[in-house]
Amino acid sequence: MPGESDYFVVRTKALPEVLKKVVEVKRLLESEKGISVAEATERAGISRSSFYKYKEDIFPFYDNSKGKTVTLVIQMIDELGFLSKICSKISEYKANILTIHQSIPVNGIATLTISIDVLAGTADISSMIKEIESMNNIQYVKILAQESTPG
């Protein structure tokens, strides 16, 4: 299809089980010294051929986010000081906030668009997003874009 993207951001729950297992094999290979592909695939419960078929096509979001600008859309219940809590959470992860735009709340709901520079020292962005999603007053967090940082 013309104009179709080569890359997508997909939540784990939408992935087929085989792709989750490929990520698990990659994690095992990185974290356990001396483990073979055969051992890792057996422990994860997939064949080596499935691993080799997909290993270059799937990786956790954070593996590819360093040196990027990640733009999030956050819908939240408007509450005094809540934007500050979100900014503090981003600061905890040592990400640099580049832009913030918050809509005027309608029926007590505000939409926040925030662009974050993911630096070499930034902690796992996936965990940061999960923590923001679990905060009181957050209705949803969506990844709008991930781009190479200019420079």
Image: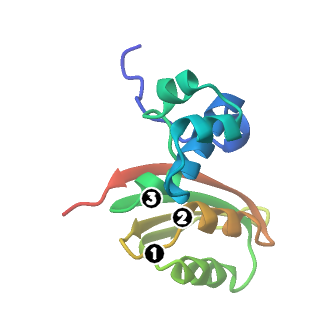
Tell me if I can see residue 16 in this picture: no
Residue under label 2: 125
Quadrant showing the N terminus: top left
Tell me if I can see residue 54 in this picture: yes
Element assignment for label 2: helix
Closer to us: 91 or 63: 63
In the depicted structure, whether residue 3 falls above or below residue 31: above
State the residue lying farthest toward the top: 1
Which residue is rendered at x = 58% and y = 57% of the image? 73
Which residue is rendered at x = 56% and y = 51% of the image? 27
In terms of sequence position, does the residue under pointer 3 or pointer 2 come before the other? Answer: 3
Between the C-alphas of marks 2 and 1, the distance is 8 Å
Residue under label 3: 70
| Horizontal and vertical percent position of residue 16 | 69, 29
Which residue is rendered at x = 38% and y = 62% of the image? 66
- Disc 3, disc 2: CB below 8 Å? yes
Q: Amino acid at mark 3?
A: Val
Q: Which mark is residue 95?
A: 1
| Horizontal and vertical percent position of residue 136 | 81, 72
Element assignment for label 1: loop
- Disc 2, disc 1: CB below 8 Å? yes
In terms of sequence position, does the residue under pointer 3 or pointer 1 come before the other? Answer: 3
Which residue is rendered at x = 50% and y = 72% of the image? 123
Give the quarter of the image for residue 67.
bottom left
Q: Does residue 99 appear to the left or right of 139 in the view shown?
A: left
